[in-house]
Amino acid sequence: MITPRTIKENPQILTYIRRADETLAAMGFTEHSTAHVCRVAHLAEKILSSLHYPERTCQLAWIAGYMHDIGNVINRIDHAQSGAVMAFRILDNLGMDADEIATICSAIGNHDEHTAYPVNAVAAALILADKTDVRRSRVRTKDPAQFDIHDRVNYAVEKAATTLTEDGAVLLELTIDTKISPVIDYFEIFMGRMLLCRKAADRLGLAFRLVVNGQSVL
């Protein structure tokens, strides 16, 4: 059985993650390194585990989360689809079951907000975990003069937490320094992602809520 440990210890996958992040750095994008993919992997797994999905399904969510951005090594455009093709080749060569490969590749191929759809539970968990990773440490430069709007919005986030509430909702709570970025800028950049999170949460029988500086906004 191919486990999260198998994937995390695979040097080929680690190389693709590292090189994909280098590609995005050269293009001026925020951090997509092992810090991001590990965070996404663990949260995707935790979401499904909290909903009492089978352990193996939770493991597949971890694997999809860890591998979801490897397509950026080719190009940012259509990276979800190219990443799914790359994941297929890697997992097939490792001998993973075809049904499990299909689940993971469907999730990876459906995580980018421009083409995404929560086609299965793993895809829904991946979307929620990926799109709620907003944090200051993802900004590569600390010079405000070099910030674009994505940098400014991420850098303004002083605290972020994604939790499952007792009444059946995925809750994203943000504390934003409005001196760095007004809340309206957050919505300009991330509204599409937040609406996708709502769709993903619905796929899991949950609601999606966004609270910014103590105020419920979605």
Image (cartoon, grey):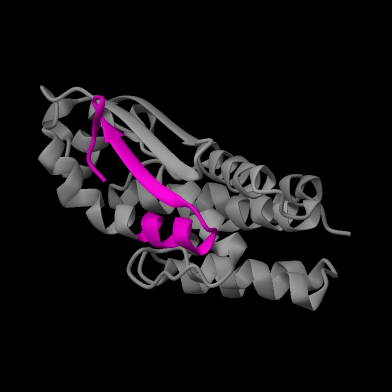
Please provide percent x and percent y for residue 99.
76, 76
Q: Is residue 64 shown left or right of residue 211?
A: right
- Residue at x 55% of width, y 63% of height: 123
**Quadrant where the N terminus lies?**
bottom right
- Residue at x 72% of width, y 45% of height: 8
Q: Is residue 165 shown left or right of residue 150?
A: right
Identity of the residue furthest to the right in this view: 1
Please provide percent x and percent y for residue 202.
46, 60
Indicate yes or no whether the magenta region holds residue 162.
Answer: no
Q: Is residue 92 shown left or right of residue 205?
A: right
Please provide percent x and percent y for residue 178.
13, 25
Which image quarter: residue 186?
Answer: top left
- Residue at x 16% of width, y 34% of height: 146
Q: Closer to the camera, 107 or 94? A: 107
- Residue at x 46% of width, y 44% of height: 169
Q: Which residues are magenta?
A: 196-218
**Rendered view: 150 above or below 98:** above
